[in-house]
Amino acid sequence: MNLAAAANETLAHNSNVLVYSAMAVYTLAFLAHMAEWVFGSRSKVGRTAAALTTQVAAPAAVPVQTRQQGGTAVLERPKVVTRSTTGSRDVPDGPGAHGGTEKGDLYGRIAISLSVLAWALHVAGIVTRALSVQRAPWGNMYEFSTTFAGVAVGVYLLLLVLKKNVRWIGLPLVTSVLLTLGLAVSVLYTASDQLVPALHSYWLWIHVSCAIISGAVLYLGAVATLLFLFRDRYEAKLADPDGPQPGNFATSVLERLPSAASLDKFAYRVNATVFPLWTFTIIAGAIWAEAAWGRYWGWDPKEVWSFITWVAYACYLHARATVGWKGRKAAWLGLIAFACYLFNYYGVNIFVTGLHSYAGV
């Protein structure tokens, strides 16, 4: 055996310890985020935001007044905000997960601090895994999953640093990260080892890293899209006098989210921003395939589903840009596109045999 190529078992073990440690801290962050939502649930700010939403989404009928200008009667028409033809409403954003309370905000800050600590341990585990085999740490599904989760958290923290209003992503993100890492360490785990010769290429660094970054950002867009569907339904019911009124926990969560229009806009901007990188990912994969297998495209299941995912997101962006789709129709199309990405990763890798199967799980 080539000792230089053998995996460093000590570093591999340390990597596992760091990943498990990160999971423990992510669990604490999850609990802190839950406390943030709970202790912010009955704030005056939250109730005020819900009241404003109700007033804007279902404005009361205001009589038209007249005033005289010389001998001409001029109509005084009040400015009324109504549901637009695209399905969005001009309603205020909610106060956030903390609901405007000091206690809720304190737990939110604790949750972010714990997320930063967990992310640092997480990244250290990924880097240590790479050092144990002296290669890119995404050569199999276990490594891809751990890196994917780390990049998703990193993008979220970067948006916070840039002062973006994204704290509402914290709870679903940490929940998803825990599920992803749990699946990685229990089902997808692969011992630290060298890869087959076909994967020893600089394209491993380029192609797979772009796929990971694209998927992490598309995930954030999918979270915003899913929350948009719930928030949009909530706003629609508020327009109905018999609809839900603030008071229970589920309603409290919905009233503190950004408005449906803000969530819709965030999802669109995120997906549109990362789509060129996903396009480059497919192109880079084709170039690597030519170098490794002597052809750019061979209708391998992974290639086919990568292209299907690209087409789905292209349809989503095209519908938004040219047809003017917004709201629920675009949201469902965006979720279908992300479902294609998930199947491309989990479904194809686990259940379908192809040229990409040699990396194992």
Image (cartoon, rainbow, N blue to C red):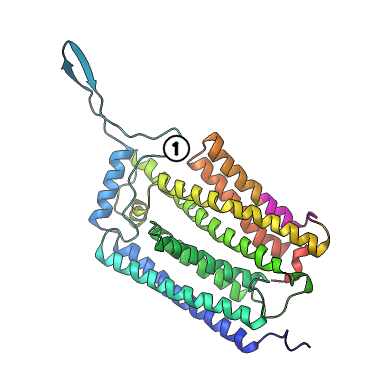
Point out the residue furthest to the right here.
294
Residues rendered magenta in the picture = 296-308
- Pointer 1 residue: 87
The crowd level at tag 1 (other Cα within 10 Å; few <14, some 14-19, many 20+) is: some
SS category of the residue bearing label 1: loop
- Left/right placement of residue 230 relative to residue 323 reads left
Tell me which residue sits at (74%, 57%) in the image: 286
- Most extreme residue toward the top is 71
User: In terms of depth relative to the viewer, which is nearer, 104 or 41?
Assistant: 104
Measured as percent of width and height from the top left, residue 209 is found at: 62, 65
Q: Quadrant of the C terminus?
A: bottom right
Q: Is residue 361 magenta?
A: no
Answer above or below: position of 311 versus 346: above
- Residue 168 screen position, x and y as percent: 40, 58
Q: Residue at x 65, y 55 (%)?
A: 280
- Image height of 196 relative to 316, above or below: below
| Side (left or right) of 58 relative to 294 | left
Q: In what quadrant of the picture does the N terminus appear?
A: bottom right
Rendering quarter of residue 261:
top left
Q: Please provide percent x and percent y for residue 319.
A: 57, 39
Relative to 245, say whether 209 is above or below: below
Q: Is residue 125 left or right of residue 279?
A: left
Q: Residue at x 42, y 63 (%)?
A: 170
Three-letter amino acid code at the position of disc 1: Gly
Q: Identify the main secondary structure in magenta.
A: helix
Q: Kindly indicate the quadrant of the structure image that contains residue 62.
A: top left
Residue 228 locus on image (x, y percent): 45, 49
Residue at 74%, 72% in the rendered image? 200
* Number of residue marks: 1
291 and 300: which is toward the camera: 291
